[in-house]
Image (cartoon, grey):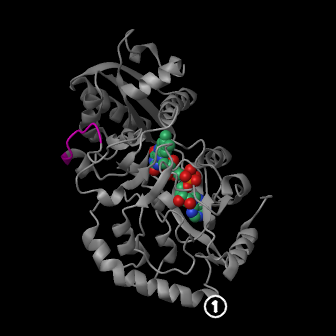
Amino acid sequence: MPSTDAADLVTLIRVLERPDWAGIALTARGGGTGTNGQSLNRGVIVDLRRHMHRLLALNTTEGWADVEPGMVLDDLNARIRPSGWFVAPETSTSTRCTIGGMVSTDASGKGSRVYGKTSDNILGLELACAQGLLDSMAPAPDWARPMLIAAEAASRAGRAAFVARTPRLNRRFTGYDLERACPEQGGFDWWRLFPGAEGTLGPISRIRVRLRRIEAEKRLIIAGFHSFREALAAAAPLLAAQPTAVEVMDETVQAIAEDAGILDGLPAAVRAAPGKRLAYLFIEINGDDPAQVAARLMDCRAILAGLPGTGGLHVAADLAEIRALWAIRSAGVGLLGRVDGPGPAGEFCRGYGGAAPDRQMRQAPPCDRFPAERHAQDAQYQGLARAPPTSACPLHAHIGIVDQPGRALVRGTDPQAAAARRPSLDCRTRG
Ligand SMILES: Cc1cc2nc3c(=O)[nH]c(=O)nc-3n(C[C@H](O)[C@H](O)[C@H](O)COP(=O)(O)OP(=O)(O)OC[C@H]3O[C@@H](n4cnc5c(N)ncnc54)[C@H](O)[C@@H]3O)c2cc1C
């Protein structure tokens, strides 16, 4: 497909509306990092990362930016950093995942504990439909009204069941957010259905993101632990020091990163002895007040000193060093997804971490693996320091079946949960 824009998306949808082609699936693709191959499909795949990746507007007075959905998060942050702003949260895949993919999976990441997940960091969006573009920040055109009325009725009908049956977790990996789309005080924020909708409601053609101010002070502590379990267990007590982010890197990732030669950048103080492995916590503290940041850093160090299994500590204050150290973690986690040869056949069920409330962090027991997981390389448990899984989170898991060559045959959210929450916007993904 040549360079495209929102109007081309409209044309494409209109063409596919013709009866002869009505059976052809249309799937939006961002960076393709979705761990279940959500952007793989039959039919037409629209490669938005390649063709729609522009920063359209930047408003540093009001703190927002309009972007095309295929813009990569790191590219966006690199563009706006000189103006003193950034966009949160930072997924481990920030070098290659797109804002459209983040919205559609309601991604979380580094900083989610403080800044929330993607749905907490967008202000509106534009949807491409056969009839034209529907912009949540402008009055709805006449052609869209019947569709929105039907969608509101379906969403309101399902809201009570959704609220009653959905665990009160901040992190809903997928599913329509009927609660926020239908606020109690009335009205219908249709665009609130899109975070986590996995492209099922149609292609998003523009997104307004909320900007956050870059805080003046930043520190990163890397703490080594003799086991993953001890590293994971440390996350909850550390919350008392109000870290901005706590991420874990386990021994497996360390081994993969070492093999790939990317561990050399780790400071000597936290390198494992030859033949040994360490698990790491990456603890970031951000703030504007140097004294407060110093106090939180001291608190962190004091908590770490009292924990079992610690093995080395390094504190970075230099921004370039902090960025380089985070890059080691995200490159290591990225390598987890590498598959040499076909994977085994079987079902998979993966839970996700993210913006868990502190309460859950304290209550949930340390756990090495998502209990329902039977197969597959599991990058996700890297996120458990953010939200240890509980038996109450099946709605927040991906399920699927993988055939012999490792191709996803069935993928998506729990179908029953999805069906229970599916509104009837006309423009859902086809096929
Ligand atoms: C190693 C690794 C680490 C990860 N770490 C994290 C993490 O820290 N936090 C986290 O939340 N996730 C994480 N993920 C999952 C993934 O990176 C995120 O979900 C990411 O936001 C997906 O973005 P993408 O651009 O790659 O989307 P894709 O994978 O291309 O697409 C994801 C879904 O969004 C839909 N979509 C994409 N663009 C649009 C659009 N414009 N309109 C409508 N639908 C659209 C697609 O159809 C698909 O259903 C990780 C994945 C891997 C492999």
Above or below residue 376? Residue 7 is below
Q: Secondary structure at mark 1?
A: helix
Q: Residue at x 42, y 69 (%)?
A: 176
Q: Amino acid at mark 1?
A: Asp
Magenta stretch, main secondary structure class: loop
Q: Residue at x 54, y 22 (%)?
A: 260
Question: Relative to residue 120, is residue 236 drawn left or right?
Answer: left
Residue 210 visible within the image:
no
Question: Relative to residue 168, is residue 16 drawn left or right?
Answer: right
Which residue, given by chain and number where applicable, does mark 1 sit on?
142
Q: Residue at x 45, y 84 (%)?
A: 152
> Dot 1, crowdedness within 10 Å: few (<14), some or many (≥20)?
few
The image position of residue 286, as x and y in percent, is 44, 40
The image position of residue 12, as x and y in percent, is 72, 71
Residue 364 visible within the image:
yes
Q: Quadrant of residue 29?
A: bottom right
The image position of residue 4, as x and y in percent, is 77, 62
Question: Where does the magenta region start and end?
Answer: 363-369
Q: Quadrant of residue 400?
A: bottom left
Which quadrant of the figure contains the C terminus? Answer: bottom right
Q: Residue furthest right?
A: 2
The image position of residue 1, as x and y in percent, is 77, 58
Q: Residue at x 71, y 74 (%)?
A: 10
